[in-house]
Amino acid sequence: MPLADHRNDSHAGGVTRRIVILGGGTGGTLAANRLRREFDASEAEIVVVDQDDRHVYQPGLLFVPFGLANVRELTRSRKAQLHDGIEFRGATIEAVDLAADTVRLGDGAELAYDVLVVATGAVLEPEETEGLGGPGSPERVHTFYSPDGATRLAASLNAFEGGRLVVNVVDLPVKCPVAPLEFCFLADWFFTERGIRDRVELCYVTPLDGAFTKPVAAKMLAGLLEEKGVELVTEFNTGSVDGAGGRLISYDDREIPFDLAVVVPLHGGAPFVGRSTGLGDELSFVPVDPRTLQSRAAPNVFAIGDAAGVPTSKAGSVTHFEGAVLVGNICRFLAGEPLDQSFDGHANCFIETGFHKALLIDFNYDTEPLPGHFPTGVGLPLMKQSRLNHLGKLMFQWLYWHSLLPGRDIPGVSSAMPEHGKRHVVAR
Ligand SMILES: Cc1cc2nc3c(=O)[nH]c(=O)nc-3n(C[C@H](O)[C@H](O)[C@H](O)COP(=O)(O)OP(=O)(O)OC[C@H]3O[C@@H](n4cnc5c(N)ncnc54)[C@H](O)[C@@H]3O)c2cc1C
């Protein structure tokens, strides 16, 4: 790949560029592996920085509370997912200096970059909600969004002999916004299997005005909650959690009682993004051009995955689809060419519905989830429960380690959302 100088003369004449990738999760790993294929070692040094060496397959956390997976089996070495010739740096990231093109690390080192990729995901912020993590947690108030939380919840669900179980999303954005709904569907299955479903009240509490953000999917998912006997409470903005008293309390003083609560806490970007002047927004996500993934703050900075402030779901599938466009654009940027504006917000989510079935939704910035088939007229059924989709959900874990993280394309599935196979309908 021919490289043009983008900063100053010292980089001209075949000097190796340094691409620093912050975060060695889904986005950082797949971006690094794709970049390594684009540039040989004489063209670019690729450095991935992460604070630990435990890469967790996060979609698997949904299954942990129900005894269908355990965290040990979902975890691999981050370093081992990186191709030869990629440097892994185990350190915390303290701040980025956009003016100096450097990153300050927790071990005191300063890392200069020619191109920076922010892939530090989203963090859980339970401390931002009054009472969350206080009295009653973790005995009655849980989350499955962290490995420890999912493991603790497994023990509580096993010991639960009946009562009111409330699943609450405090506010958006959250990672994989359908996962809390999947939790409700799996809870219905789990308590049915245990023979105590008639003793368990299930309730889903959301700040949205429906079960989901997109009208057609929201209607379908609300129908499914009703079919499975899960109460839906909408427009509930959780102000505090009274774990000892067993109540969610909204800012407008509504109360939802519970015996066991499963709460998805507020999410924000990595705190160092907020500490890095100019890099983040008020939630510490990185504002980028939604079509090119280039930062609004500096042309040599890009963001991928949950860290990127783009109006689509925070999901591993989105991160994978972003990967091809992001890496193409880093190549273009270094070659002094105009960027490709083709990222369309493509998201693709399997929604586990229990009893060995799942739904599939596929959408982008402009097109909401629609019925039909994916990726063509004869593929997986969209917005319809099927065993095939359940197998697709299980297959996704294999694809994650063997195709997504190595930075490979999935045959027949491109970055851009496929139109073929979709039926346009209107939600009533
Ligand atoms: C319960 C659950 C279910 C999900 N289900 C699905 C699903 O079914 N389908 C789907 O597509 N997606 C799903 N997701 C979402 C998916 O896992 C994420 O969207 C995806 O992993 C995002 O990748 P990322 O690279 O942006 O962030 P991550 O993979 O989280 O990586 C961020 C990395 O940055 C590192 N980091 C952060 N701050 C620092 C710092 N200061 N110093 C050093 N390192 C730092 C972290 O250690 C981490 O390794 C689910 C997520 C959860 C929690």
Image: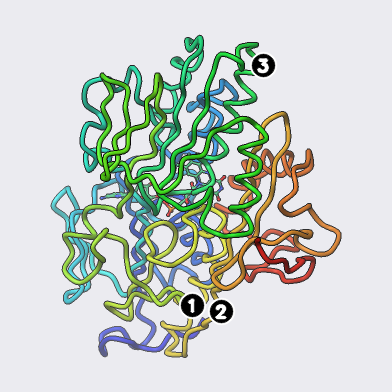
Q: Nearer the viewer, residue 46 or 345?
A: 345
Q: Residue at x 79, y 59 (%)?
A: 373
The CA span between labels 2 and 1 is: 6 Å
Compared with 423, 239 (above or below) is above
Which SS class for mark 3? Answer: helix
Q: Which residue is mark 1?
A: 291
User: N-terminal of the two: label 2 or label 3?
Assistant: 3
Q: Amino acid at mark 3?
A: Glu
**Residue 74 horizontal/vertical position (percent):** 52, 33
Disc 1 packing (10 Å; few <14; some 14–19; many ≥20): some
Q: Picture coordinates of residue 379 (x, y %)?
A: 81, 57
Quadrant of image for the C terminus:
bottom right
For label 2, the crowd category at 10 Å Cα-Cα, with few meaning under 14, some 14 to 19 and many 20 or more, is some
Placement of 10 over or under 244, stated as above or below: below
Q: Of helix, strand and loop, which one carries label 1?
A: loop
Residue 26 against residue 332 in the figure, above or below: above
Q: Residue at x 52, y 65 (%)?
A: 323
Residue 239 in picture, x, y percent from top left = 26, 41
* Residue at the disc numbered 2: 342
Numbered tag placed on residue 193 in the rendering: 3
Left or right relative to 33: residue 235: left
Task: Give the SS element for disc 2.
Answer: loop
Q: Are marks 2 and 1 in contact (CB under 8 Å)?
A: yes
Give the foreground label among 2 and 3.
3
- Residue 226 in the figure: left or right of residue 249: right
Give the residue type that dot 2 points to: Ser
Mark 3 and mark 1 residues within 8 Å of each other at the beta carbon: no
- Among the two numbered marks 2 and 1 on one chain, the one whose residue lies closer to the N terminus: 1
Expressed as whole percent of the image width and height from the top left, the position of residue 354 reads 67, 31
The amino acid type of the residue labelled 1 equals Arg
In the rendering, which numbered label is found on residue 141?
none
Sequence-first disc among 3 and 1: 3
